[in-house]
Image (cartoon, grey):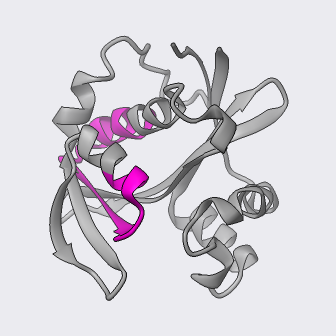
């Protein structure tokens, strides 16, 4: 499957992506944020968002922040792949792209929150080295993974140029 991973840096396009994937999250994303528009603006101003495309269709995305220089911890805010494209390496490709960027910036680990009952997401992150750190709220757990663990799975991917936003990739 030929997939193109590229950065999205327009608030309106980020909002469209959040709307497309709204129901991929448990609970749905719109119930966890003030508004999808405000959240898209926050992601655009303070984070980064990359999409995976097959042709003209967006089939997955990852958003993250790299602004905690004290602990050198990147934070994965969202990662989703359309159901019909899961188990094809798309989530792993998106995660590896985040890892490469984090390594360039000097980050040592990545943190994330995951719903306690989202067994599929927990298994995915554990596969990539994430471990339980603490209960974050009544319904979510905070997990962390070392960047080096992610690197081991990413060795077959070409490192993109720093200024380039389109990364062609081949998944198996």
Asked whether residue 50 appears in the rendered view, the answer is: no
Q: Is residue 46 something one can see in this rendering? A: yes
The residue at the point 77 percent across, 63 percent down is 19
Query: Quadrant of the image for the N terminus?
Result: top right
Measuring 20% from the left and 42% from the top, which residue is drawn there? 129
Magenta span covers which residues? 97-122
Viewer-side residue, 80 vs 69:
80
Q: As displayed, is residue 112 above or below residue 52?
A: below
Q: Is residue 3 magenta?
A: no
Q: Position of residue 10 (x, y in %)?
A: 75, 55
Q: Is residue 102 magenta?
A: yes
The residue lying toward the viewer, choosing from 103 and 123, is 123
Query: Within the image, what quadrant is residue 45 found in?
Result: bottom right
Relative side of 105 to 23, left or right: left
**x, y percentage for residue 54?**
74, 25
Above or below for 55 versus 130 = above
Q: Position of residue 118 (x, y in %)?
A: 42, 62
| Numbered circles on residues, count | 0
In the image, 114 versus 52, the foreground residue is 114
Q: Residue at x 67, y 68 (%)?
A: 40
x, y percent for residue 9: 68, 51
Q: Look at 27% across and 81% down and name the residue there.
A: 136
Residue 133 left/right relative to 45:
left
Q: Is residue 157 above or below residue 79?
A: above
**Which picture quadrant has residue 76?**
bottom left
Q: Quadrant of residue 51?
A: top right
119 or 108: which is nearer to us? Answer: 119
């Amino acid at each position: 499957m030929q997939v193109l991973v590229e950065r999205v840096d327009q608030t309106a396009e980020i909002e469209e992506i959040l709307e497309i994937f709204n129901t991929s999250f448990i609970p749905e994303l719109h119930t966890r944020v003030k508004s999808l528009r405000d959240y898209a603006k926050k992601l655009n101003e303070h984070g980064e968002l990359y999409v995976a495309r097959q042709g003209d269709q967006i089939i997955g995305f990852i958003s993250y922040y790299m602004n905690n220089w004290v602990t050198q911890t990147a934070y994965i805010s969202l990662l989703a792949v359309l159901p019909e494209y899961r188990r094809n390496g798309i989530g792993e490709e998106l995660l590896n792209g985040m890892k490469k960027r984090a390594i360039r910036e000097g980050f040592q680990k990545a943190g994330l929150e995951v719903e306690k009952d989202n067994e599929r997401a927990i298994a995915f992150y554990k596969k990539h080295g994430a471990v339980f750190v603490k209960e974050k709220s009544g319904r979510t757990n905070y997990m962390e993974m070392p960047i080096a663990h992610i690197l081991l799975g990413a060795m077959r991917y070409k490192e993109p140029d720093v200024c380039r936003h389109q990364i062609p990739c081949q998944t198996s």
